[in-house]
Amino acid sequence: MNSEEEFYDAVTGFDSDNSSGDFSEANHKVAEMLDLDPHQSNRTGKHNGETEIQENGIKRHRTSLPAPMFSRSDFSVWSILKKCIGLELSKITMPIVFNEPLSFLQRITEYMEHIYLINKACSHADPLERMQAVAAFAVSAVASQWERTGKPFNPLLGETYELTREDLGFRFISEQVSHHPPISAFYSEGLNKDFIFHGSIYPKLKFWGKSIEAEPRGTITLELLKHNEAYTWTNPTCCVHNVIIGKLWLEQYGTVEIVNHSTGDKCVLNFKPCGLFGKELHRVEGYIQDKKKKLCVIYGKWTECLWCTDPTTYETYKKNEKRGGEQKKLKPSEDVIKSENDEADDMPDVQDTVQFIPGSKLLWRINCRPPNSSQMYNFTSFAVSLNELEKGMEAILAPTDCRLRPDIRNMENGNMDVASKEKERLEEKQRAARKERAKDEVEWHTRWFHQGTNPYTGTSDWLYSGGYFDRNFSDCPDIY
């Protein structure tokens, strides 16, 4: 039976504070093959879909998917799960209608949606401000999961995904390095050589009857090269509710500890469970401390925004709140987007937004989604662009890249029957290849990552071996 390490999530971005970077020889080659010269201005020209070159020479990415999502109203997750009680969730095969047209490797790439926060961290001279920006980046990484109840496609063993965004100043590569257990490894670097961001993700799944919980495994590492600093953390737990009946909804909870291995400073973030009446839904509270004391308090919602203030102000406000004092609630015009109050069975009633503490500093806010996002699997603008296959791209992509997967491509185009058949074909091909290796006693070798030790935590990790952007793909496996 196919391995469906489904429902495991990971997550996220994109802001006006983006920086562009230097370009390597390989990047110039890619730009030439795509007919996209990053240094040439006053050009216009459309490629596949809505992709075009703006007058300033920067590529404009598509703003919608080729076809709207299919309705899931006629399908029940419970009809599948009820047959699998007591079994490992990694063994469950789910109908394609519960997917979204992205691979999990592309879902990981959504970490980079709010890359401007990394740029801010790199630019700050004060280590406290750097930690604040890194904490905001860690929270923003799960923000795109809000209302994303479709599961990404499980990557095939050896599957890869690359993304170079000159406008945002980074390039990214990921690979599915293990099938049992499912492990996805990724590596990203700034085009200005100012940061390295890498990690591996392998969630542990639990089925609780009405919900599916994805407990995160794997270390996330961010290195700020200019400051000779490294930060590590692990994502919060993600839970999908109402898998039996009602409207699916997501919750993030658990403690995230971000460690600055150079200074010893820590940021402890508590993603709060919603509670009986939903009062704490989406809330995040925490603090940054050095080796002696708390330096600031962080609060907000992972679906909206994040603020920070000094500990004394925060404690005074909380004491006043308990006594029933006045509280100022932010309006959308005050840099926060109010949570949408969706009526649904067993879903907490969300009416309050973040309560503002006077004197607080805004660290991050979520991006507005496209107006048609609900017809596009609740994708952000960044997510909409991830599976875009532009003219000439097939010639330079690795043959294992997600964009070339026929099941995802057909689903994106609305061809659900073809997508389902292709998904079954690819899974069978993967099983046959695994049996053949076992028969010949041939061990699988990863191409772009190797198993090693995280230099900062001392724990097992998957590390980038290098060489991907040299574009020598002659020994890549045939997985499609």
Image: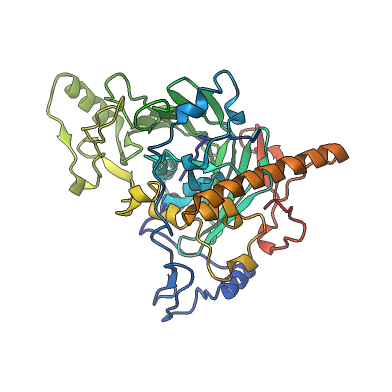
Left or right of 317 in this view: 391 = right
- Residue 10 in picture, x, y percent from top left: 50, 39
User: How was this image coloured?
Assistant: rainbow
- Residue 4 in picture, x, y percent from top left: 59, 35
Question: Could you tell me how many numbered marks the image carries?
Answer: 0
Q: Residue at x 66, y 54 (%)?
A: 400
- Residue 108 in picture, x, y percent from top left: 52, 45
Q: Which image quadrant for residue 85?
A: top right
Residue 66 shows in the view: yes
Left or right of 241 in this view: 397 = right
- Say above or below: 250 vs 396: above
- Residue 135 in picture, x, y percent from top left: 42, 39
Q: Nearer the viewer, residue 358 or 394?
A: 394
View extreme (bottom): residue: 42
Q: Which image quadrant for residue 232?
A: top right
Query: Quadrant of the image for the N terminus?
Result: top right
Left or right of 71 in this view: 419 = right
Q: Residue at x 39, y 29 (%)?
A: 271
Q: Nearer the viewer, residue 43 or 457?
A: 43
- Say above or below: 466 vs 295: below
